[in-house]
Image (cartoon, helix red, strand yellow):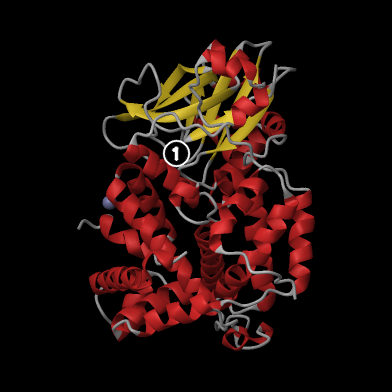
Amino acid sequence: MTETHSNAYASVVGALTASEAQDFERHLIECSACAEEVMDARAIASALSTTVAVNPPARLRGSVLASIAHTPQEQIATVTALPRSETVAADRSSRRNRATSLLAAAAVVAAVGFGGWAVQLGQDASDSQQAADVALSQRAKLASLLTAADVQTAKLASLLTAADVQTAKLASLLTAADVQTVSGRFISSDDSGAVVMSEERQMAVLVATGLPKLPEGKVYEAWTVKGDPAPAGIFTSDDSDAVVELSDAAFDADSIAVTIEPAGGSPKPTGDAVFDVSLPPA
Amino acid sequence: MSVSAPISVHELAPLMAAASHGDEQAYAQLYDATSRNVFGIVLHVLRDHSQAEEVTQEVYVEAWRLAKRFDSTQGSVSAWLNTMAHRRAVDRVRSAERRTQREHRHFEFQSDNVAADPAELVVATDEGRRVRRALAQLPEGQRTAVELAYFQGKTQREVAEHLQVPLGTVKTRIRDAMQRLRKQLGEAAS
Ligand SMILES: [Zn+2]
């Protein structure tokens, strides 16, 4: 077994360092054998916790329930390719919530589905903090527009300097009176993405940070979803961050999704979504 | 004590589904059914009562927030929660260790704050007993490797140093241990 494969069991008992764990998460996207092993072994690791069960103090229950009462739940819209006739009857929100996966392309589903488990890893924003401090001072105004979003502003702000979309163009988007930012999370990693759009400027971009590196011959493809998903742009994860200009269809889409596709992109998604975010009704 | 009628693991998935649509009552039931294990593992790794409460709270709030991501084809609700809890606890222990190393201070993990040895508080359950028996049947090297990693939050490299064996040996021991446990505990493992 190779170095990375051999980390499957160690990952389940939490014995990987942060960077090993990150490499392994990436590996899981492309290795269904590991994904399966991990899924099985996780049940065993979880059973180990029964040997140390301790009743929590009673006050914790009240405190948890009080917190959740004002914690909004993340809405995940899975890319849905239902026939038109079926979606017409359903209202906008129930259609969005329908957890229909696109294709049961087993390997991708296993890996990506698994990835959902990785998401809750403690998030440490401090690594990008320094870069962000610089970016923030230079671009205080832009950054302040982003504070509305619950995407890590720091990360986004630092991205603005690295973005390969022209910064001037982005700046004009971010300062538009009707700019809207909708944030979401990548399912296969612990990172954030956001869709920033302005109808006035006729521009919509997808901003993503910390993208897992893709296997050779694969690309990320963005989709605008309204009934059937339509291709909205292709991008890679060369420097782990991406700013992708989306097609105009974003303006009346119900959601924006990202899948992993063969190089060159696909006319229809062939994998389950690794990211998606519902857009507010126009 | 809030543990009312026991809820079997099979009833957890529907509770989770209801919770993912905002049903707070279902979530309360879910908490009652799962919090001993979540709190237990967090306390065991952190060995600090107030930090364990904090982390347990974080886990349940995060699981509520991300409830829609729970996918029953990928494992049980308890595995989902326990995995999340274990990771957070391990993360916290490690960052506390890093901090302490940076400060060049002698490291004793919050020892004043430990009310009692968590082992004394452990609630014996049937499943716990069964898993403990299975653990006890592992060859010692395997058991120690799993205990150092899972219950003490050590990385595989630290385990190797601690046991003075090569890293590859640790990997193999952990893998063999987990595979043996799987065989012994069979499908009933949650
Ligand atoms: Zn592998």
Is residue B108 visible in the rendered image? The answer is yes
**Residue visible at 74% across and 51% down in the picture:** B24
Ligand 1 closer than 8 Å to label 1 CB? no
Please say if B76 is above or below A204. below
Q: Is residue B133 left or right of residue A186?
A: left
Amino acid tagged 1 = Leu
Q: Residues within 10 Å of mark 1 (few under 14, many from 20)?
A: many
Front one among A79 and A187: A79
Quarter residue A227 falls in: top right
Q: Is residue A278 visible?
A: no
Q: Residue beneath label 1, please?
A: A211
In the displayed structure, does residue B138 sit left or right of residue A202?
Answer: left
Q: Is residue A50 above or below residue B75?
A: below
Give percent across and percent down for residue A35. 34, 50
Where does the image place residue A156, in percent across and percent down from the top left?
Answer: 58, 36
Q: Specify the quadrant of the image occupied by residue A269.
A: top left
Between residues B79 and B10, which one lies in front from this camera angle? Answer: B10
Task: Indicate the position of residue B185 as horizontal and vertical percent values.
Answer: 38, 71
Q: On screen, A275 above or below B119?
A: above
User: Going 49% across and 75% down the picture, which residue do you hit?
Assistant: B127
Quarter occupied by the C terminus of chain A: top right
Instruction: For the N terminus of chain A, give its image quadrant.
Output: bottom left
Chain on which label 1 sits: A
- Residue located at (56% from left, 59% from top): B81
- Compared with residue A278, is residue B42 higher up or lower down, i.e. above or below? below
Residue A276 appears left or right of B60: left
At horizontal 68% and vertical 55% (from top left) the residue drawn is: B61
Tell me the SS state at disc 1.
Answer: loop
Residue A155 occupies quadrant: top right
